[in-house]
Structure formats: C-alpha cells, structure tokens
Image (cartoon, rainbow, N blue to C red):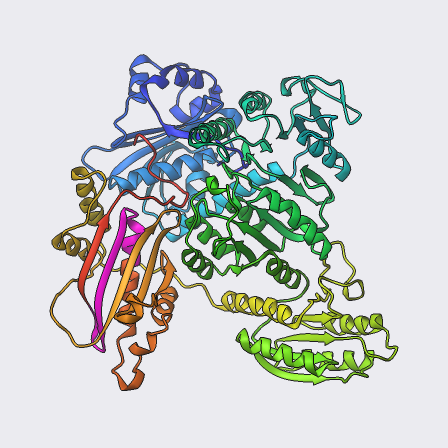
Amino acid sequence: MVADGGTVHLRPIRPSDADALVEFHAGLSTHTRYLRYFSAYPRIPERDLYRFTNVDHHDRVALIAQLGGKIIAVGRYEREPDTDGAEIAFVVADAHQGRGIGSVLLEHLAAAAREIGLKRFQAIVLAENTAMIRVFRDAGYAATRHLDYGEVTLEFAVDETALTEAVMREREQRAEARSMRRVLAPKSVAVVGASNDDGKIGHAVFSNLQRMGFNGPVYPVNGEADLVGGVQAYPSVRDLPEDVDLVVIAVPAASVADVVEQCAARGVRGLVVISGGFGERGDDGEREQGREAQRALVSAARANGMRVVGPNCLGVVNTEPQVRLNASLAPLPPLAGRAGFFSQSGALGVATLGEAARRGLGVSTFVSAGNRADVSGNDLLQYWETDEATDIALLYLESFGNPRKFARLARRFGRSKPIVAVKSGYGSAVAGLAHTSVDVPDISAQALFEASGVIRVDTLGDLFDVALLLTSQPLPPGNRVAVVGNSTALGVLVSNACAAEGLALARLADVGVDGTPEAFEEALAEAAAAPDVDAVVVVFVPPLQRTSNDEVALAVRTAAAGSTKPVLSTFLGFDGVPGALAAVGDSSPAPGSVPSYPSPERAVRALARAVRYSAWRQRPPSPVPEVVGADLAAARDLVTAVFADVPDGRVLSSAEAAQLLACVRIAVSSVDVPGVEVVFSVHDDHSFGALVSFGVGGVATDLLGDRAYAAVPLSTADAAELIAAPRAAPLLSGYAGAPHADLSALADLALRLSTLGDALPEIAECTLRAVASSNGARVTSAHVRIAPPTARGDTGPRRLRGL
C-alpha cells in the first residue's frame, strides 16, 4: 500500500527481470536518470544489467515495485565489504513519483538489512534531489549530512526506533485510509451484471444506487440489453465511455476473472464483488477450487492497484451527502449518522441496517466484507480513525483475519473513538462461514478485546444499546449513578442493576407519581450538576393524571442538554430515541438526544459498558518495555537449528529449553524453595498470535481452569494486571496470614516470557512452573514445544519471499 491508497506488488528482483528493467529504464525521463545515476546514462550496459538483476539477496539486495506486471520502481542496497554498512539507492518512474513508493522501498530494505546484522545505510544524493533527501528525512532516521561538490552524503543507523516505528505506522494508516476512501467515495460507479430482471442481484444493486441518488454517473454493464433502468447499458467494462472508480460485480463466479482483467485495463480503483461461489459452499474439492479462484482474484486486483470488498458480500454504503452511495443489496438506505458499521456476515448486515434505522441509529459508512479476501475490519478502522463523519466503530465479527494488527489498531483507535464489537462465540457462529478465517477461542478474543479497550457485547441488541448512548451522550467520567424518576419500583430496579454491573448508586430522586415536567427538569438538573454523580438514569411511566408525556420529555431533554455527563432513560418503555427526546441535527441520533431503553436493566448494562470503556481511555497508555539483556538473535539461532534438523518442530530437551529461556534472562532451577506455586504459559494461537496465561498452581489452575490471559506483547500495566487477575490471586498477597509474594518479580517474569513469545512465533507452547515468595520468583521447570507458526503476523516490513 502506498501513500495515495493505491497498491503495488513488491518483490525481490530476479535475473528474468532483465528485459522489464531495460524497459523501465528506457521510460525514465532524462532528468530522473540524471538524479539517480549522476549522468545521462541513456541505456543500461550489459555488464550493469547483469549486476543489477543477479543479486545474492543477502549482502546485495534489490527490490522491485510492479503495477500491472510492469516495473515502476527499483530499490537496492549493496554491503560495503567487511563492514556493517551498505549503500542504498532507489529510482521511481516519473508517473509514480510522489506516491510514497520510495518510503515503502526504504522500509523494506531497512528491515532486510537488520535481519542480516547491518547497522547503517549510506546514500549519496545530488544536492538538487530534494525529493529523495526528504524521503530519508521523513522516515524518522537521524541522518548525518555531508555536502561535497554538489553531492550530499547521508548516513544513518537502520535500527528500528520509536520514531521510525511511529512514522511507518502513520504512513500505513494514511495509505490504508485513502485506499478505503477510493472504495467508499468514488466519483463514478459501474455495475457489471446490472439487469432489468427484478429477480437478479445486479438489478437490486443498480436500483439501490439510483434510489439513493448517487452523486455521480452510474453505468450498467449488460451484454444483452441496450437500456437498464432507463440508462444506456454497455456490453463490457472495456466499452464504458470513461474510466470509473468503483465497479460492482454481480455475475457468476466463473465470469469474475475476466471482469477483473477488464477493470485493470480501465484503471479501476476498487471492486465490490457481490458474486458468491468462492469456496463458501460445496464439497471439499469445490471449496478448494473456489478458494483458489478467490486467491487469483485478489492477486490480480492488488497487482493492478485495486482493493476488493468481498467476494460473497452484501456491498458498501456511504451516507455522506456529497456521495450518497448504496452499492449494496440493502433495499432501504440507512439513516445518516455518525456510526461506521462493519459486518462480516452479509445476510445479517441487511437485517441490522434495518434494525438500526428502526431504533434511530444512523451510520456514516457500512461495509459487508463477505469472504473478506482483501478488505477487512482492520482497513475500516484505519479509515474511520481520521474520518470526520465517523464518531464510533461498530463491528460484527465471526472470526479474525489478522488479530495482532486488530489489537494494535484498536488500542490507538480507542483513544479517540470507541469500538463496539459483537464477536460471535458461545457456539453462535453462523454455519457455513468458516471459510472466512479460522475462529479465535472465546477466551482469546476476550483477552484481545480487553487489552485493546474494545467494548465487547454479546448480541446485536446490546451493540445498538451501547451505540445509541455513545453517539448521543458524552462519556461518563466515573461509575457513580443518580436515578431520577416517578416510580419507586423502577428506581429499585435501576439500583439493583447498578449493583450487578459494579456501578455505584450515588442518589435516588423520586419526583413522585404526580411529578410535573418542571419537577423532572429541576431534579435532573440538580443530579447532573452534583459533584458526586457521573451519569443519570431517568425513569418515567405515564401517571394517571393528564400530564403530557411530551412535556416531560421536553423537560428531560432540556436538562440533559446542559449537562456534561451522560443522561439516558427508560421512557414509556420506548426502544431507541423517541421523537420528543431527540435533539435537532443532521445525524441520527443527533448529539444531545436522550436514548431510551425498554427496561432499566438494559439501560444500566449499556451505561456500565460505557463506564468501563471511559475508565480504560482515562488510563495513560502503558509502554511495552525492552527486556534488558535479552539476546533474541541467539534464541532465533536455536529455533532455526531445531527446524534444520526437524522441519515440523519438536519438544525441546530440558537443556535446550533452559538455553532458550536464558536468552531472555529466565533461569531454570530445580532447587526446592518454600512459597506459592504458580504457572505461566505462552502459546501460539492459530489465528491470534501469542497469548500469555497465568495462574496460581494446584487445584485452582489445573482443575478449575483459573487462569488469566493477556495478548502479546505485554505492557508494564498488562503484566501487573495479569498477575492480579486470577480468582486465586489473593494467595499471593498474604491471604489467611500467608507471606506476601514478590508481585513485581512475577510481573517481570511475565514480561520476559511475553518478549520471547512475541519475537518467536515458532514457540507453539512454553509452560513454566515457578515458586513465588517474598524473595522473588524461581522457575523450577519448563516445557517448550517448537512448531511452524500458524498465526498471521502483523503487517509492516517483513522478510520477503526469496530474500
């Protein structure tokens, strides 16, 4: 992914690329060749061509960027003999300069250099080549500069620092956000398979685009009709009168590959593939054939700069007034609002959009991912993070594609905007959708969500409950709740619900069954202004007298509008935002609206989740510490040696396990120590990555499963919370007169194990039994099993195939 949101294919150069490299060089302008080679260099001599294309992928590395099968950029480094440094250079085709391709090449070359132990890069650049100098400067490296006769020599360490990491992640966010903007805010759309037959999917999509009033041209593509929906049709994408940004594909799976090829030729930027038949159904052979077709689809699209939503998806929606895109099967457009909604399930997405509208919850953008072959929830988080039209992310997830990346993105996203997620679990996953990715065990998902500040809910009803509160009211600063109402019985229900959710009841104000609208307004304003109150729940049932319900609602809304604390209600048993409680605005619900819930318990449950999220957000981020004295290179060498001998891995011997643990300064000793037995474990989750678990030894851990889990890598705070989390943790803090264990030593042990598991995904399982005492924590035994990693790693520069 490059800076403008486009995609390019990056790979090591091969000898067979010689002709393509000559063609690339010939296409460079005279000025670009001069800046790269310091001379006209009109053609590449045979000797140089051989040297450029024949590299050892170690001391001499060259990467090419391709688009549509053609080379558009080359980057390389060559090691200076007998040193830890290398000279780096790259050149980008004129038409693709300014897209951030040089920055991507630099990131990957630096990652490759670090893997072989190189410490520094040197670049010699003409002083007038300010664009190239800016690439090195903007990458975050601290470069020294030396000017000599119009040439600038830049030298910098290639070590990854907090600054270079931040720069890389910021570039990644911008690029992925822009790639999604191409899909969600196109200037023009074509529907392949558009039809006049109202029983066809293409008819529904084309009609929905027209009905929504898309702010741009919509072209139907149908080889058998002159007009579709009253609009001139075209026999193929090749025949369209202009290039289009987005193509919606609703044709049989067998025809999709040809459509993608045509889209590539016409410079299409995004594809929404409604078509199914890509491995989600059929027998094993048919599924594998479909998955192979899906891989080919995505490969062809990405190689030509296109992102893919789907296949087998519902489509995408953008309610932005300047866009008005409904390229989906949703028959009615959703209400415009501030919630971004991502659904992994297409069928469920249609139902939830309708339910959201019924309850008065509007969306900014909606994406149904289907098979999620390319675009995933992670891409939407990148987009929504900086999207001014989105205040909250709503996710329906059946599985994770890249959970490590999700955790990283969610931690950052959640600091400014909340994420509410339904992760299907407890046996409720939709049948037949296992093809989307392997599922994450529920306890693993819970650990992932908690570490990331994500508000996890169990049902779509709960998702809407929380979303209505967060889109209409401010976050609660604490957990102290006031109740204002005209029903003592309902007030007691609120009080009981607060106790069950861990919220503190600060005050209970009963205006009485004869309470007037003025009494409601005064009591609510007083409660909201009280320093010992963080949120207010209003309960109202219609009295026998003729007090106007609308008058009471207006009084509640007026008092709530002046509050900096959240106000929510159980108002006449209404579910959503009744008109009388709705503020005026362009979105639904408008900020300042007071959400209503059919029961006090649901209102309090939504509030409790907002309270816990607010508390997470108020805690400052905790850093992931560097383990002093760790030798991860030595650990990597040990694992590599095991695989060289046994490619499928094996259980390490006691001596090997001790040697591996010593790389992160964990010593194993079988000497008896008095104290409390504890158990640590790090294991490779097949779709999640590494998880660290901790439990107090004995019956509690082994029989009752009293373990706490946390996602790797652990921060300092994560480690401390992990040690305190098991139900049996009081045994470590002097319970029943027992001596206090050194909790900081246990947290340090967790951090060291986390470092090892994060650095070596080949550690399938590592279980440590230790004894905790007031003098520290001593590891008494270790069981380590090495296997090929099964989890998908986080994105970023990684060792490329062939290096």
Total marks placed: 0
State the image coordinates of residue 164 (x, y, percent, origin top left).
Answer: 40, 48
Q: Which residues are magenta?
A: 754-778
Q: Is residue 756 magenta?
A: yes
Name which quarter of the figure residue 489 lies in: bottom right
Q: Is 501 situated left or right of 556 in this image?
A: left
- Considering every residue shown, the one lying at the far bottom of the view is 737
State the image coordinates of residue 782 (x, y, percent, origin top left).
Answer: 19, 59
Q: Is 99 situated left or right of 327 in this image?
A: left
Q: Nearer the viewer, residue 86 or 435?
A: 435
State the image coordinates of residue 42 (x, y, percent, origin top left).
Answer: 41, 15
Q: Nearer the viewer, residue 118 or 775?
A: 775
Q: Is 28 situated left or right of 634 in this image?
A: right
Residue in the picture at 56% in, 41% down? 369
The quadrant the C terminus occupies is: top left
Residue in the picture at 50% in, 66% down? 616
Q: Is residue 526 visible?
A: yes
Q: Nearer the viewer, residue 81 or 612?
A: 612
Q: Nearer the viewer, residue 699 or 682?
A: 699
In the depicted structure, whether residue 90 falls above or below residue 611: above
Q: Is residue 323 visible?
A: no
- Considering every residue shown, the one lying at the far right of the view is 546
State the image coordinates of residue 562 (x, y, percent, origin top left).
Answer: 73, 72
Q: Is residue 739 magenta?
A: no
Residue in the picture at 70% in, 17% down? 224
